[in-house]
Amino acid sequence: MPVDFANSLGEDAVVGRSSALEAVNLLDLAPVRLAAWEEVTDCVVILRPRPCKRRIPPLWEWFRYLLSAKRIRLDEFGSFVWHRLDGNCKIEEVAHELRDRFGPKVEPVEERVGHLIRMLRQEELVAYPGWDDLGSSLQSGSSSFP
């Protein structure tokens, strides 16, 4: 049975995002990765991008970047999810695949996947096509940066 994450994901807390998203079942969305990443011992390490180069970013964006981790290491569950955030796979499908692969140790799977994607979106590492401005920040299919 699908879970409606519209309120549980706290989408209204994400600055500059449409409030219309509150009425959408987020399990039906297919997020896309915005950041480069690399594989380190079977886990994904996300490389936080610098503030936008196509314009002069506000000072607070630079402070946020300087104070935050530049490399974010995901565990095996997060890495599994990250690989499926290609804009083609819906959150609901990702949750089912995660449950099939790891069994009961990932329960409650919908809440775990929803929480991870919400955090990644707040950090602007993933976006919802059609809802978020992807601009030129969309990474190619490459799994790592040189």
Image (cartoon, rainbow, N blue to C red):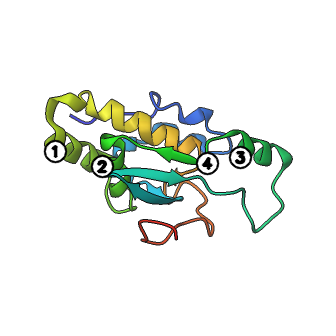
The residue tagged 3 is 65
Looking at marks 4 and 3 on the same chain, the residue that comes earlier in the sequence is marked by 3
Determine the CA span between mark 2 and mark 3: 26 Å
Residue 29: x and y in percent read 39, 51
In the rendered image, the residue lying farthest to the front is 41
Residue 112: x and y in percent read 35, 32
The residue depicted at 59 percent of the width and 49 percent of the height is 124
The three-letter amino acid code for the residue at tag 3 is Tyr
- Vertical placement of 91 versus 129: above or below? above
Q: Which mark is residue 80?
A: 2
Q: Secondary structure at mark 4?
A: loop
The residue tagged 4 is 70
Determine the CA span between mark 2 and mark 4: 21 Å
Looking at marks 2 and 4 on the same chain, the residue that comes earlier in the sequence is marked by 4
The three-letter amino acid code for the residue at tag 2 is Phe
The three-letter amino acid code for the residue at tag 4 is Lys
Q: Nearer the viewer, mark 4 or mark 1?
A: 4
* Residue 37 in sight from this viewpoint: yes
- Vertical placement of 58 versus 34: above or below? above
Looking at marks 1 and 2 on the same chain, the residue that comes earlier in the sequence is marked by 2
Determine the CA span between mark 3 and mark 1: 35 Å
Query: Left of 96 or right of it: where is 6?
Result: right
Looking at marks 3 and 1 on the same chain, the residue that comes earlier in the sequence is marked by 3
Q: Secondary structure at mark 3?
A: helix
Residue 130: x and y in percent read 51, 59
The residue depicted at 71 percent of the width and 46 percent of the height is 65
Q: Nearer the viewer, mark 2 or mark 4?
A: 4
Are there few (<14), some (14-19), or many (20+) residues within 10 Å of tag 1?
A: few
Specify the quadrant of the image occupied by residue 18.
top right
The residue depicted at 50 percent of the width and 52 percent of the height is 46
The residue tagged 1 is 101
